[in-house]
Amino acid sequence: QVQLQESGPGLVKPSETLSLTCAVSGYSISSGYYWGWIRQPPGKGLEWIGSIYHSGSTYYNPSLKSRVTISVDTSKNQFSLKLSSVTAADTAVYYCARTMVRGVRVWFDPWGQGTLVTVSS
Amino acid sequence: QSVLTQPPSVSAAPGQKVTISCSGSSSNIGNNYVSWYQQLPGTAPKLLIYDNNKRPSGIPDRFSGSKSGTSATLGITGLQTGDEADYYCGTWDSSLSAGAVFGGGTQLTVL
């Protein structure tokens, strides 16, 4: 059974960099699939941030691309998110998820439980 | 403003059927597969439907998906109080701003 678990600081100061890690268990990242990040501001909908393959190939949301870096560590079976120059608008629950991206299809399954990151001084 | 348009809310009585629509364009739903997610209160989203109409293992056949042109529909039959949740559609957008996109979400109330 594939399980994902997000970890990282719950509070980040404005203009600083948000850093989160997603640990994967029950499945080897190197076996396939993309691995992605999705966020949800309080009381709002879902926003895809980006996804990475074990080879390092990435897709990023164009609206966030200039501030986002997603990396993968196959030796630790985990992947990470860095979002720079954060503002209050980046306050959200951040989810990691296994991602199918192939041609005309994309879906996310399963998801981690999510971690709330608040941007505040 | 979401790329995909969903009604903010729908409601129906227990045992009844409800449908949730998701409207897009030729750059997303019109030429790509659609997925649907259920988010129960306080929990992470869960995949309900992928590739327009396929159900992952463990998802009951009360949930169904369909697509026609640039719109997709999630159907839920035999409504239960436990189905009260937010539902999101998602797909790939192949425009210049390519990437995964979601609808704004629909809150289902089982009266």
Image (cartoon, coloured by chain):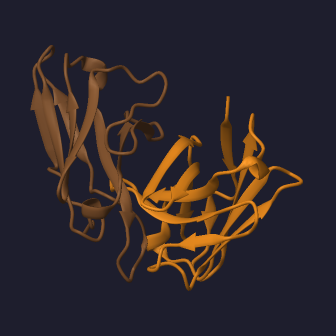
Position in image of residue B32 (x %, y %): 34, 59
Residue B68 vertical position relative to residue A66 in the rendered view, above or below: above
Pick the residue in front: B26 or A95.
B26
Residue drawn where x is 47% and y is 50% of the image: A107
Position in image of residue A40 (x %, y %): 43, 56
Specify the chain shown as orange.
A
Quadrant position of the C terminus of chain A in the picture: bottom right
Pick the residue in front: A23 or A30.
A30
Q: Is residue B23 left or right of residue B84?
A: left
Residue drawn where x is 73% and y is 44% of the image: A24
**Residue B84 seen by the camera:** no
Residue B108 vertical position relative to residue A33 in the rendered view, above or below: above
Position in image of residue B44 (x %, y %): 48, 40
Quadrant position of the N terminus of chain A in the picture: top right
**Residue A24 seen by the camera:** yes
Position in image of residue A70 (x %, y %): 67, 69
Residue A20 vertical position relative to residue A59 in the rendered view, above or below: above
Residue drawn where x is 57% and y is 59% of the image: A37
Colour of chain B in the image: brown
